């Protein structure tokens, strides 16, 4: 990572508070090797702590003047007792217990006087699974950067020797191309005017939409729907995870002529509406999602943040899941068309403009008084397609756990790994004490979207009811079986 920081990198540092830290994380589920001893994980922790020499950015701290960050500077030594920690729980396979521990680890901000990362190893007293929770400050990199580091940490082969953790692994040196200074200066000035022109065009289109002259454009900021998920972000987090087969998502996208992202947006939208209904909030109007857009050019492997985050309107007023999908497809593609017609930097600066207002509202503690930009934030990050290993321990799943945007909402981040979409969900625990039902609703929404192709009578009102019906049917069947066993017990009939 370069020592100089981009504007967006600095923004993550300047806007961080105890109530809303700006780190991102991943919860990784691994399986112990067959020949693992009872000391396997304590030995692993000791080995990890032995790597006390870090490389950039893992050995850097923020250099600032009056709280304003300027660059990252190397630190003399890593405090490995801080950076690598060990936790013992009853059973890692108990997801509810694991989610609660993850939420507690995710809540506090990273120590500002140390390099901005931590590595937590979580062992269970029972079972063969263990977990690793890693958190790192967002100013070190965006999703693409963090996934690349993650892939560099794990090998495609199961091997005990040659392991080097990411914080001490030397990165490949970047070849510097010779740059014509005159040409570079001219292009910079030229791009500056293009960016200003595109920003003014974006703001003009937003204005005429606000005036009702032309409604076919991106959503007007701060017109989102207030829910229990939005508002002033407080300390405390709730975390959940779930999995959906990525092959299944791709097959459904082909059937319904939608992109993978549009299928996911529809499932998340239906699931969040059902979750809000459980809490007494029913909305016919659309919810909004903040959608991160990767602004990197193909082959760009630099560190730092190169993203834009813009709101996308979801579905409204229809209970037919297929119609809701078509609404989301159109709204999603309106934003994509706007992005294609603008310089990538213009979209990034537009993000900075609208998010700055959210940050001001949050710092003034008035986020509850204004409408949010969005209700949810959905990110889709492509991960490794093949099985990976940490030394000789098999990596089973990787769940991204992100930060919360100003104005609140639920952050849903998906990472595809080994043909499975691993989904991490996080929100503030001010009004929400568990996200487990929401994780379940995402899977049910996928079932609903698949089944509505052949059954047009299905509606979003069926979500959450199908499983209950099946449970009731099972209960009736069990009662019938019990009666049959009672009737034939004298005849020696057994039932399993």
Image: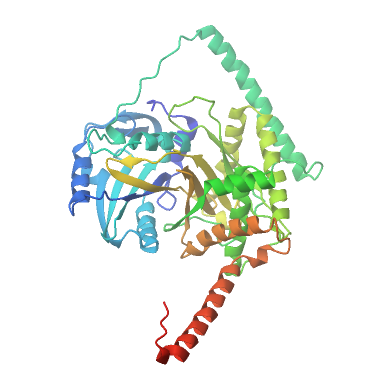
The percent position of residue 165, horizontal first and vertical second, equals 28, 36
Q: Nearer the viewer, residue 322 or 270?
A: 322
Q: Decide: is 77 above or below 326.
A: above
Q: Is residue 103 visible?
A: yes
Residue at (43%, 34%) from the top-left corner? 145
Residue at (69%, 41%) from the top-left corner? 218
Q: Quick check: 323 left or right of 273?
A: right
The percent position of residue 44, horizontal first and vertical second, equals 22, 45
Image quarter of the C terminus: bottom left
Q: Quick check: 461 left or right of 44?
A: right
Place residue 277 in its image quadrant: bottom right
Q: How is the image coloured?
A: rainbow
Q: Is residue 66 visible?
A: no
Place residue 3 in its image quadrant: top left
The percent position of residue 194, horizontal first and vertical second, equals 65, 22
Image quarter of the N terminus: top left
Q: Quick check: 477 left or right of 170?
A: right
Of all residues, the one furthest to the front in this rendering is 491
The percent position of residue 189, horizontal first and vertical second, equals 59, 16
Q: Decide: is 21 above or below 430.
A: above
Q: Decide: is 215 above or below 175.
A: below
Tally the numbered discs: 0
Of all residues, the one furthest to the right in this rendering is 213
């Amino acid at each position: 990572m370069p020592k100089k920081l981009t504007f967006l990198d600095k923004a993550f540092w300047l806007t961080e508070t105890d109530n809303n830290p700006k780190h991102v994380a991943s919860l990784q589920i691994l399986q112990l090797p067959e020949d693992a001893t009872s000391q396997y994980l304590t030995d692993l922790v000791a080995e990890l702590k032995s790597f006390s020499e870090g490389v950039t950015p893992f050995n850097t701290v923020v250099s600032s003047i009056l709280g304003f960050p300027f660059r990252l500077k190397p630190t003399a030594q890593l405090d490995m007792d801080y950076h690598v920690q060990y936790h013992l729980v009853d059973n890692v396979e108990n997801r509810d217990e694991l989610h609660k521990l993850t939420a507690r680890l995710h809540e506090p901000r990273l120590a500002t006087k140390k390099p901005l990362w931590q590595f937590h190893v979580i062992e269970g007293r029972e079972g063969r699974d263990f977990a690793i929770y890693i958190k790192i400050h967002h100013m070190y990199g965006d999703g693409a950067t963090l996934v690349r580091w993650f892939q560099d940490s794990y090998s495609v082969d199961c091997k005990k020797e040659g392991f080097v953790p990411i914080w001490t692994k030397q990165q490949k040196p970047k070849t510097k191309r010779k740059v014509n200074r005159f040409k570079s200066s001219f292009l910079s000035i030229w791009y500056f005017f293009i960016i200003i022109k595109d920003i003014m065009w974006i703001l003009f289109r937003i204005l005429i939409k606000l005036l009702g002259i032309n409604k076919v454009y991106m959503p007007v900021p701060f017109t989102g729907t207030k829910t229990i998920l939005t508002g002033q972000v407080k300390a405390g987090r709730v975390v959940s995870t779930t999995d959906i087969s990525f092959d299944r998502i791709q097959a459904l996208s082909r059937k319904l002529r939608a992109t993978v992202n549009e299928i996911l947006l529809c499932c998340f939208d239906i699931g969040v509406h059902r979750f809000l209904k459980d809490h007494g909030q029913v909305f016919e109007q659309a919810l909004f999602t903040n959608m991160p857009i990767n602004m990197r050019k193909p082959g760009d492997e630099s560190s730092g943040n190169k993203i834009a985050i813009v709101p996308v309107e979801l579905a409204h007023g229809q209970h037919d899941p297929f119609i809701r999908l078509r609404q989301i497809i159109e709204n999603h593609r309106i934003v994509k068309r706007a992005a294609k017609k603008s310089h990538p930097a213009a979209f990034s600066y537009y993000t900075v403009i609208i998010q700055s207002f959210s940050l001001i509202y949050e710092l003034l503690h008035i986020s509850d008084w204004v409408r949010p930009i969005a209700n949810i934030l959905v990110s889709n990050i492509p991960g490794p397609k093949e099985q990976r290993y940490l030394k000789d321990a098999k990596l089973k799943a990787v769940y991204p756990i992100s930060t919360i945007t100003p104005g609140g909402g639920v952050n849903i981040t998906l990472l595809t790994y080994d043909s499975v979409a691993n989904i991490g969900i996080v929100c503030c625990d001010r009004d929400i004490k568990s996200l487990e039902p929401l994780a379940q609703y995402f899977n049910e929404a996928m079932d609903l979207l698949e089944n509505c192709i052949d059954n047009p009578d299905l509606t979003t009102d069926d979500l959450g009811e199908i499983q209950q019906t099946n449970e009731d049917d099972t209960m009736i069947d069990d009662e019938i079986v019990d009666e049959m066993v009672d009737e034939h017990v004298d005849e020696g009939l057994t039932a399993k």
